[in-house]
Amino acid sequence: MLAPDQEDALAFASSPLLETVLSLHVLAEPRHHALQHGWVRAMRRLPAPLRREIAALSFLYRYTLPNCVLPAASGADDDFAGELAALRALPTDVAAFELVRPIFDHGGKSHSRRTLLASPEVRARALKNARAEGRDAGRAAAQLFDDPAAFVERFARLLDQYWEAAFAAEWGRIEPLLANGIADAGRRIAADGIYPFLAGLAPALRVEPATHRFGLDIPHDHVVRLSPGNPLVLMTLHRRENWMRPPAGGPSPLEEVLGAVLAAAEEFPEARFVYPVHPNPNVQEPARRILGNRPNVHLLEPLSYLPFVDLLARSTVVLTDSGGVQEECPSLGVPVLVTRKTTERPEAVEAGVNFLVGTDRDEVLAALRRHLQQPSRRPGSPPLSSPYGDGRAGDRIRRAVLYRLGLGERPGEFKPVIQPGSALSSARRGERVAEGESS
């Protein structure tokens, strides 16, 4: 909460230590930082031991950052050596308390600091999370519990080595840009006040001038009301190949697809378009920019598996670039529009229950229009026959092995219940729009 006359309470700082750790985050999650791929490639030249250590400690900066690397809200800006010395000077229990937070969110409750690292439950949960990053990460996290002072020094040593090997030169390049950004922010606040400035920072920043409040907010629907008169279009769109912009410029494939969804939502106001949006900012931003103001488009947080399957089963049609959804929907009788040029799961496309529609706006809109005007769910109660098999492959493998060993009869050749083209009328076969196919 910040009153309009408290401009001086808003602090700006540029921190070489923080930028160093943010750079390590980019190396830990390169696919989420398309603009930094040049840096990622350049960092492949780092010494192999340093690259291994960056990977081993990646649980500290892959998803969030420990508070102990953030700059203070007051005081003069320091150089990297000064900030690193301040990190090393922290009491061990304070530093360890913050460093464990990326793998065990303790909520910042300082009263638990003395007992947190001694808790077997905390240790078990934190090590489980760290081991998801690999065995070396699991061993490093164990050191955080067993010898926190040594671990804090290990982290500081990694930052020092990475700074000397690579990031010092990069800081020399970006520090003037950060300084210019801070000066520009000061000018805008002086001219317009705090809240107009904050409102322009990002779509995810919630600004409430009337109550003098602001904070991060990613709006999403909590309730989607459906009835038999509301066709349901379920969407999962997040592949990197679709959200990256073409080298020649113009809209990304994802923006093309979302433009088709917007047009379909306007054309079919009775339909409900439900989109559990991937947390990747490269997906969040265009989804909310293009679809955020349509009353019949519902942008949800990512769903757990069972609620998602329940939505799949209720859907009129599914629009996706996901591989797993292509496999699940045929058993539910739900047609799938695949927003890709190719698929590693051609069986359902050949059988006519999934359709490659690409990412061209007009093609995607035409496919959505067809399925909303003439719904084409397969009749029957799930699970329906699937072009991927019938779930009995294990028994067939057993019998084949016995046959090879001379201990049984030769098993018959497997033929899927859905043969290529068997589920289609000639009209639906003409719906395929993949490159190179003909009706």
Image (spheres, helix red, strand yellow):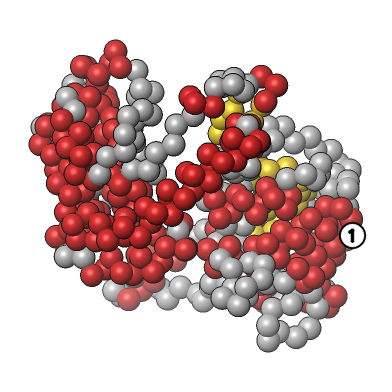
Residue drawn at x 27%, y 57% as measured from the top left: 167
Is the residue 239 above or below the residue 191 in the image? below
Q: In the rendered view, tell whether residue 341 sits above or below residue 105.
A: below
Q: Residues within 10 Å of mark 1 (few under 14, many from 20)?
A: few
Viewer-nearest residue: 18 or 106: 18
User: What residue is at 66 percent from the left and 76 percent from the top?
Assistant: 350
- Residue 386: give x, y in percent of width and height: 62, 62
- Residue 230 as seen in the image, left or right of residue 325: right
Image quarter for residue 188? top right
Q: Is residue 272 left or right of residue 351?
A: right
Q: Nearer the viewer, residue 305 or 237?
A: 237
Question: Which residue is disc 1 drawn over?
Answer: 373
Query: Image quadrant for the C terminus?
Result: bottom right
Pinpoint residue 274: horizontal percent, then vertical percent. Answer: 71, 46
Residue at x 67%, y 25% (from the top left corner): 209
Q: Is residue 372 visible?
A: yes
How many callouts does the rendering have?
1
Q: In which quadrant will I find the N terminus?
A: top right
Q: Vertically, is 37 above or below 114?
A: below
Amino acid found under the numbered disc labelled 1: Gln
Camera-side residue: 363 or 161?
161
